[in-house]
Image (spheres, rainbow, N blue to C red):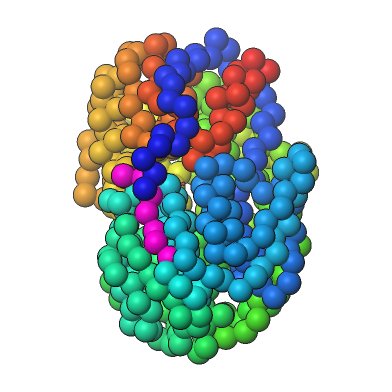
Amino acid sequence: MSSEHPHPSHDWPAPTAVAPIEATVTVPGSKSLTNRYLVLAALADDTSRLTRPLRSRDTTLMCSALQSLGTTITTSDDDTEWIVEPAPLQGPAQIDCGLAGTVMRFLPPVAALAEGTVSFDGDEGARRRPMAPVLQALRTIGVDVDGDGLPFRLTGAGRVAGGNVHLDASGSSQFVSALLLAGARYDDGITVIHDGKQVPSLPHIAMTVEVLRDAGVLVDDSDVNRWRVEPSPIRSLEVDVEPDLSNAAAFLAAAVVTGGRVTVPGWPSATSQAGDKLREILGVFGAEVTLDRHGLTVVGPERITAVDLDLHEASELTPVVAAIAAFADGPSYFRGVAHIRGHETDRLAALATELNRLGGDVTETPDGLIIRPQRMHGDVFRTYADHRMVMTAAVIGLRVAGVAVQDAGTVAKTLPEFTTLWARMIGA
Ligand SMILES: O=C(O)C1=C[C@@H](OP(=O)(O)O)[C@@H](O)[C@H](O)C1
Ligand SMILES: C=C(OP(=O)(O)O)C(=O)O
């Protein structure tokens, strides 16, 4: 479906740092929160207001999809306020998921509540991302879905019975979040039971539970691998979207790899965002990390300490964290992230291939990477339609001259302003 190129393709020479980076970088709103709020606002019983949401490809696709199902979304002239007016969900509709996990996983359980047929498709890469557990779970509660991955068609009957579903969420926490987000609107609510290996990215499920509770929905998450959402109305939202802490990773990494100092203002003192784990992770690399009323400040160490980290809780940080490890004082080991082979691209393969092309020494393991720092040189850096590969290349480029980042525009998936913010940070 998304045959058109989602953004102008351009190559970007990653700038090198001539001195330690000293900067304050304001990061736009969280993708994970913006797309959860949009879904809940579309299912709510009254009008919601989102302040400072993220404007990016993933959130624009979410807006378009919800609009095609009948929701009205109006934005202020400066785009900092979005008003979401729910309406009965209605097919027929065609939903373009792009490459957004949150759109392709969160919307089928919502579309199941619509009357009519809803077709789903996305980028070529999206057709390779796992979807089956969520679609099979919907089938077990009576929803008519004709496939196990993109493209597929779902025919809603205007209501969903709900009840108990068993699924294997070891491939993505989003399978669980998806069913919980819509479950309050099912006749019997929903109980999701995970059977399988460890669920990755658990903070993202905690975030889902938190936003549901903020909307007045009763959720029981007291047992491991079982979540219960009671049937109930969803209260409208008045929310100020937190900055995207995972998107802050590259800017903070710039302080670490150049021995500089970077502050990200507005860092929440309590948050369910997985990106908050950066405070701990960057500390393990030897950085000084301070959270105070100015925001989060990271001061890079003289020598970067090699690390041995299980990243399963914050797996989306792996690409940028790998870039830091490429400059450490010894080999680093990353574990617990087998499932990121099913992210925007096979991230373990992509990181190993691209860092090795620059002269790195990176080995893939079944569930992670081993990174042995080497002197690297400039070359092409391919990004595989993965926004975080652009961010990884930018961090490497600070210390390696001549890194030519292919298709840097793909960063617009979550941060269209990335190269502008990056240039400003270096020039600050
Ligand atoms: O629910 C969410 O907003 C997300 C959940 C995680 O997915 P996985 O569980 O597939 O890693 C994360 O990596 C992704 O960037 C966003
Ligand atoms: C895995 C990611 O995205 P998605 O929401 O598309 O799964 C990511 O942003 O790193």
Going by the image, does 257 lie left or right of 315?
A: right
Task: Identify the residue shown where x is 53% and y is 14%.
Answer: 17
Q: Residue 318 location in percent, x, y? A: 40, 42
Name which quarter of the figure residue 192 lies in: bottom left
Residue 118 in sight in this render = yes
Going by the image, does 192 lie left or right of 45?
A: left
Question: Closest to the observer: 285 or 427?
Answer: 427
Going by the image, does 156 lie left or right of 87?
A: left
Q: Residue 59 location in percent, x, y? A: 56, 49
Q: Magenta span covers which residues?
A: 118-125
Name which quarter of the figure residue 292 lies in: top right
Q: Residue 165 location in percent, x, y? A: 37, 81
Name which quarter of the figure residue 247 lies in: top right
Can residue 254 be found in the magenta stretch?
no
Task: Identify the residue shown where x is 44% and y is 58%.
Answer: 94
Question: Closest to the observer: 218 or 181?
Answer: 181
Does 379 appear above or below 348? above
Does 409 appear above or below 426? below
Going by the image, does 3 lie left or right of 230?
A: left
Residue 177 in sight in this render = no
Q: Number of labelled discs?
A: 0
Does 75 appear above or below 201? above
Task: Identify the residue shown where x is 76% and y is 62%.
Answer: 238
Task: Identify the residue shown where x is 33% and y is 34%.
Answer: 384
